[in-house]
Amino acid sequence: MVSVGVLALQGDFLEHIQLLNSIPGVGSFAVKFKNDLDKLDALIIPGGESTTIGRLLTIKGLDVGIREFVNSGRPVMGVCAGAILLAKNVVDRFVGETGQFTLRLMNIKVLRNAFGREKDSFESEVFVDILGNMKAVFIRGPAIVEAWGDAKIIGFIDHPLGRFGAVAIERNLIAVAFHPELTGDIRLYKYLISEARR
Ligand code: GLN
């Protein structure tokens, strides 16, 4: 049994928990406190509002907990706001530098609100190396615009505004700009779980 935690401070954590529960051999847990991380093999940081989740992370000491979790080699997938929280560098399409808290764990630059505002949310197809084409829902989503060091962009979206990174990996970390929990496609979850088993 692989135990996957979903950070449950704000955002759509329930959708991830429901999807994880449909995968045989996987147990899912809501993570609200630092010691909830102890029993886990992998963690998902869900979408929501990255500034709010970031603030709550620091208040609860979960920032320290997640850094330790990653240093122990266990895998973490950050989805949408979660991808923003993993990034070392964040800018917003409308306001530029956001100065917001992030965990600074991945060598990626993320453009918040890359495709416009809430009303510009859309569904499209993303091509991901190894995994293939994937239906993808972007909700006021970010784009991954740069990767350096060990980080690599492995998924791309072609949008009227240009071609952008949608999935990046670096060691035991995965950043995803769209919402796999909404399409029921379990391939990224399986990738996360296979990393946990390594
Ligand atoms: N725009 C949100 C943010 O910047 C992310 C949106 C999402 O997670 N769906 O935090």
Image (cartoon, rainbow, N blue to C red):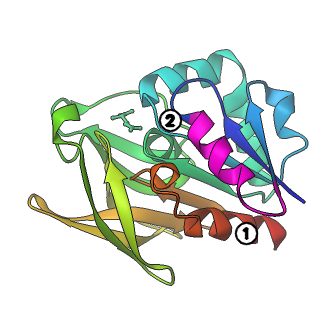
Q: Residue at x 39, y 53 (%)?
A: 177
Q: Quadrant of residue 183?
A: bottom left
Q: Residue furthest top?
A: 59
Q: Nearer the viewer, residue 177 or 14?
A: 14
Residue range (magenta): 13-26
Image location (x, y in percent) of residue 97:
26, 33
Image location (x, y in percent) of residue 116:
16, 40
Image location (x, y in percent) of residue 12:
52, 34
Q: Residue furthest front?
A: 22
- Where does ligand 1 appear, by image quarter? top left
Q: Residues within 10 Å of mark 1 (few under 14, many from 20)?
A: some
Residue wearing tag 2? 102
Q: Nearer the viewer, residue 194 or 74?
A: 194
Q: Residue at x 52, y 64 (%)?
A: 185
Q: Residues within 10 Å of mark 2 (few under 14, many from 20)?
A: many
> For the residues marked 2 and 1, what is the alpha-carbon distance in whole angstroms?
23 Å
Residue 117 can be seen in this image: no
Image location (x, y in percent) of residue 87:
46, 47
Query: Is 88 left or right of 142, judged from the image as shown?
Result: right
Q: Amino acid at mark 1?
A: Glu
Q: Amino acid at mark 2?
A: Thr
User: Counting residues from the N terminus, which is met first, the one under dot 2 or under dot 1?
Assistant: 2
Q: Quadrant of the N terminus?
A: bottom right
Residue wearing tag 1? 195
Q: Nearer the viewer, residue 99 or 28?
A: 28
Q: Secondary structure at mark 2?
A: loop
Q: Residue at x 28, y 39 (%)?
A: 140
Q: Residue furthest left?
A: 160
Q: Residue at x 74, y 72 (%)?
A: 194
Residue 86 can be seen in this image: yes
